Image (tube, rainbow, N blue to C red):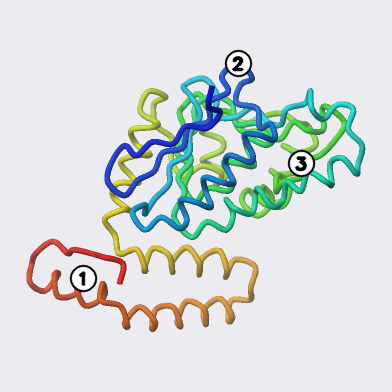
Amino acid sequence: MQELILEFPQPAVALLKLNRPEAHNALGQPLRAALAARFAELACNDEVRVIVLTGNEKVFAAGADLRAMADAGPVDIMLLNNQRMWQAIAGCPKPVIAAVNGYALGGGCELAMHADIIVAGEGAMFGQPEIKVGIMPGAGGIQRLARTVGKFKAFRMLLTGEPIGARDAEAAGLVSEVVPDAEVLDRALALAGSIATMPPLAVAQIKEVLLGGQDASLDTALLLERKAFQLLFASADQKEGMHAFLDKRQPNFRGR
């Protein structure tokens, strides 16, 4: 059985489905490798403008595969080089939308936090429970969480290991929006379809500048923003977008 399913449900949108239902979509090494390979492939596919990542109606991803880790030593863990697999997702230049139903725990929560937009069902739960098995998050579950929800909420989640619900996650800034459970994937695909009609160069520059400027000084971040803004005036899409607006017609953005 394929652990990761790739579909193209609508033009310019790729849908990746985690498919280990018997293991609650635990992120074993084969699944991590498949995710890295697919993200690297889709990043270079000019036909794809947005990627949607999801699990199933009961679980997004319930963390790492503990059976493979219980007796591992530090060198075993180091040699896995998991950071390289995560980097393929973190470095994806295209917008990534996570559609989350059910549990997003441990590595599953870290995976969701690699997305640019998170659409969560009302019954979704987010957490970093690693402390309960004697370890801590190791793929961004501390640093990304703290940068997203702030020090005090992050400490509460990390030190208790207790998950939070979708509404609390939304209030904390961890979730973009919450919808009824049955509407999660449809809403994520609708967002993806809308973004896919936007000019790809502008989309890519917005993502690059937002992420690149987060840890920079305000002056440096504003410089990045200004230079990217100026650069887009060299694109055919800028001419198309502005003239289409003036002509009162729909633009045809081609990523040039």
- Contact, mark 2 vs mark 1 (Cβ under 8 Å): no
- Residue at which label 1 appears: 241
Local SS, label 2: helix
173 left or right of 153 in image: left
Q: Mark 1 belongs to which amino acid?
A: Gly
Q: Position of residue 208 (x, y in %)?
A: 50, 67
Which residue occupies 59% across, 66% down? 214
| Residue sitting nearer the eye, 153 or 232 | 232
Q: Please tell me whether residue 19 is drawn above or below residue 76 in the rendered image.
A: above
Q: How far apart, in angstroms, are the residues tagged by discs 1 and 3? A: 44 Å
Image depth: mark 3 or mark 2 in front: 2
Local SS, label 1: helix
Q: Earlier in the sequence, mark 3 or mark 2?
A: 2
Q: Which mark is residue 137?
A: 3
Q: Which mark is residue 22?
A: 2
Q: Earlier in the sequence, mark 2 or mark 1?
A: 2
Dot 1, crowdedness within 10 Å: few (<14), some or many (≥20)?
Answer: some
179 left or right of 102 in image: left
- Contact, mark 3 vs mark 2 (Cβ under 8 Å): no
189 left or right of 90 in image: left
Q: Which mark is residue 203?
A: none
Q: Position of residue 216 (x, y in %)?
A: 63, 73
Q: Position of residue 143 (x, y in %)?
A: 72, 52
Dot 3, crowdedness within 10 Å: few (<14), some or many (≥20)?
Answer: some
Q: Position of residue 232 (x, y in %)?
A: 35, 78
| Residue sitting nearer the eye, 206 or 37 | 37
Q: How far apart, in angstroms, are the residues tagged by discs 2 and 1? A: 48 Å
Image depth: mark 2 or mark 1 in front: 2
Q: Earlier in the sequence, mark 1 or mark 3?
A: 3
Assign the N terminus to one quadrant of the image. top right
Local SS, label 3: loop
